[in-house]
Image (spheres, grey):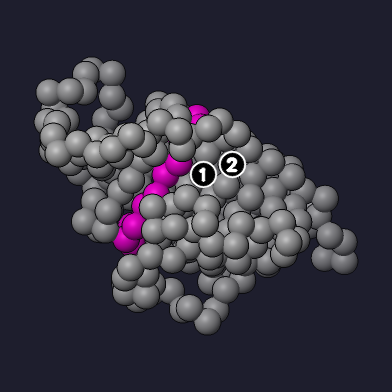
Amino acid sequence: MCDIYAEYRFLACACNVQTTHESAGGSSSDTVDTKASVDQSEQPLILASECGFTKRDNELLKLSSTDVEKKDVVLTSLTGCHVAIQGSPSTVHITSIRDCVILCGPTSGSVFVDDCQKSVIVVACHQLRVHRTSSTSFYLHVTSRAIIEDCSLVQFAPYNWTYAHLDEDFHKAGLDHTRNNWSAVDDFNSLAADKQSPNWSVIDKDARITSWSENGTPS
């Protein structure tokens, strides 16, 4: 996985007016007008009900509770990025990521993952659907059964990210802390009830990342 911690900057939601930049060497008090600094002709159309990031390489990307409140989060074409999303979005769409770490607060709807490789995804949701994904680990809280299709070498462990106001976000999302079906996975390519799917497994306890900082880095 790429070294995404050596040099990074914090970016706010794509639909925000301002963003604050910070590097590993220190922080800057300057704020930048997104409209002035981003070539809008090169950016995909983001609806008022959406926020997110696209076509980013080797960056630390952050969304706050205010950014994602009652919005869909869209993450596409990310490579070597570390994404930390606090709050309770409506849905999350993760598409075409490589070598990324994505942490997200409780989602009131579904999380959709497609075409992801060699990444770590930490999510809490009512439903998780994963397509065309390989060599990716999920730290999961889900109230239904996770669904995978056309996947290989995907692994699962319990959700373990914590941050301030996490309990409040669980309540907003309508998720029950005590009900987690993280290891109940339906593989549409391996439906035999009496045979374990070869496409997914549980992460061994001694191989799991045990905790994350509030900013989303392993701790």
The answer to whether marks 2 and 1 mark residues whose Cβ atoms lie closer than 8 Å is yes
Find residue 114 and report its image quarter. Answer: top right
Task: Provide the residue span drawn in magenta.
Answer: 79-89
Answer left or right for 104 relative to 186: left
Q: Residue at x 36, y 36 (%)?
A: 24
Task: Indicate the secondary structure of the residue bearing disc 1.
Answer: strand
Answer above or below: position of 12 versus 58.
below
Q: Residue at x 68, y 61 (%)?
A: 185
Magenta residue check for 88: yes
Residue annotated with mark 2: 119
Tell me which amino acid carries mark 1: Val
Tell me which amino acid carries mark 2: Ser
Whether residue 50 is visible here, answered yes or no, is yes
The percent position of residue 174, horizontal first and vertical second, equals 38, 74
Q: Residue at x 37, y 69 (%)?
A: 166
Earlier in the chain: of badge 2 and badge 1, it is: 1
Residue annotated with mark 1: 101
Answer left or right for 152 relative to 61: right
Quick one: which residue is furthest to the right in this view? 194
Answer left or right for 100 relative to 133: left
Figure quadrant of the N terminus = top right
Q: Residue at x 73, y 61 (%)?
A: 206
Task: Indicate the secondary structure of the residue bearing disc 2.
Answer: loop
Whole-angstrom CA distance, mark 2 to mark 1, is 6 Å
> In terms of depth relative to the viewer, which is nearer, 129 or 172?
172
> In terms of depth relative to the viewer, which is nearer, 105 or 142?
105
The percent position of residue 131, horizontal first and vertical second, equals 61, 43
> In terms of depth relative to the viewer, which is nearer, 119 or 90?
119
The percent position of residue 199, horizontal first and vertical second, equals 77, 48
Q: Residues within 10 Å of mark 2 (few under 14, many from 20)?
A: many
